[in-house]
Image (cartoon, helix red, strand yellow):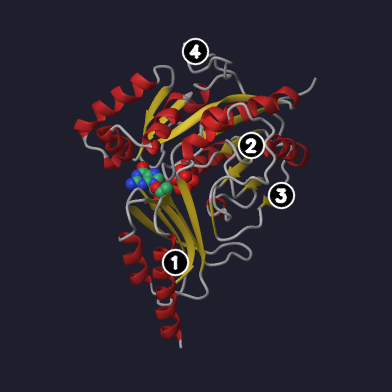
Amino acid sequence: MSQTTPIYILSGFLGSGKTTLLQQLIDHWQGEGLLPAVIMNEVGDVNLDGLQVQEQVPMTEMLSGCICCSIRGDLSGEIAGLIQREAPDVIVVEATGIANPMEILEGVSEAALYLPIDLRGIMTVVDSAHLLELYNVQKGKTYRLMQEQIRCASALILNKMDRVTEDEEGLLQSIVERWNGYAGVWKAVRCRVDIPALLDALGGVKADWTRAADNESKQAAGELVPQNGREQKAEPHGESQPLHHPHHAHKSHHHESHAHESHDHVMVYTHYFKGPVESMAFERLIANLPRDVYRAKGVLTFSDTASRFLFQYAFRESDFMKITPQGNVPDVAVFIGEHFSRSELEQALLSLEQSGLRETD
Ligand SMILES: Nc1nc2c(ncn2[C@@H]2O[C@H](COP(=O)(O)OP(=O)(O)OP(=O)(O)O)[C@@H](O)[C@H]2O)c(=O)[nH]1
């Protein structure tokens, strides 16, 4: 009898906490003796989230585009490759924060027509404070995309509750219940949720799943076949790019305009550092980023510290973590936002590099 591989889609706006949840899912499955595998999609051309996932987790990286549109045609090939190479017990597809989940759902559903996979549902992670702020304004593409990601969820993780007051909790709950009365809701800080309960609540995804009222739970089954391997698919291109690459094959076109409409306002700038920079100066630059930059992350060598750091910036909060990356990871920072001035940002980063170089002379 042929066996199907359960597959989960991890959705949520940029910086909401998807990778934070992914780490917990992986720990849980590994604790059960299972082999999870990950398909990680990034809009930039470097996968920094992958550095936070253990080496032994098989991972395929789909970079430089969004699986909901520009590289959606590649998704089924990636799933098939992972199953063939690694025989994982479960697969998680971590979408880019700007992906329209409906399109990813369609991509995975198409793949399920000819691959032995069983789509269990979409987990959407929400930055609760960010949602409340956008809800107060009630407009903008980011707001609509967040709304879409919430509507499409089969499970909702209201994350970053540490940034929400008790008074705001009620409003938050009522917003998400109005938008999606079907999904189970988990409130969390750092995505710390009851993972077995979360997984138990996810059943198969129905064709008309956005309106489905019932939620049958299915049990994941699988044999342990521990192997290891990572593969990277990057498209060669310049350092700053729009998110749609005409040279990518589009297998399916019927939803294209809708998908692009969801995030064609977003731009990415990737900066490769030529040398170390001073830590305080870099922190100041991050603290003063224009509001239109809503996500940044990178790996850096500072001129005044011994260790290398992974930095994260999401919705005006930054975080620095010491890391020792495996392999040859360059000093690089990725900035994602809307209509910000690439040249101003580049100039600011270049002058940081200049003063860093003077210091190490
Ligand atoms: N204050 C606060 N920060 C959090 C929480 N959960 C995650 N973070 C931080 O938010 C930042 C983004 O978290 P990630 O898990 O990388 O978010 P993501 O959704 O994977 O980000 P992208 O893949 O870039 O879209 C990191 O600096 C996390 O440490 C939380 O509950 N509260």
Answer left or right for 317 relative to 253: left
Q: Nearer the viewer, mark 4 or mark 2?
A: 2
Q: Secondary structure at mark 1?
A: helix
Query: Disc 4 vs disc 2: Cβ atoms closer than 8 Å?
Result: no
What x and y, as percent, mark residue 145? 43, 34
Q: Secondary structure at mark 2?
A: helix
Dot placed on the residue nearer the N-terminal end, 1 or 3: 3
Query: Of the residues shown, which amino acid type is indicated by label 2?
Result: Arg
Q: Nearer the viewer, mark 3 or mark 4?
A: 4
Q: Nearer the viewer, residue 273 or 213?
A: 273
Query: Of the residues shown, which amino acid type is indicated by label 3?
Result: Gly
Sort mark 3 into few (<14), some (14-19) or many (20+) by Cα contacts within 10 Å.
some
Question: Mark 2 — residue?
Answer: 72
Location of residue 312 by image quarter: bottom left
Residue 235 visible? The answer is yes
Dot placed on the residue nearer the N-terminal end, 2 or 3: 2
Between the C-alphas of marks 2 and 3, the distance is 22 Å
Between the C-alphas of marks 4 and 2, the distance is 25 Å
Question: Mark 1 — residue?
Answer: 346
Outermost residue toward the left? Answer: 167
Between the C-alphas of marks 3 and 4, the distance is 38 Å
Question: Mark 4 — residue?
Answer: 212
What x and y, as percent, mark residue 327? 63, 64
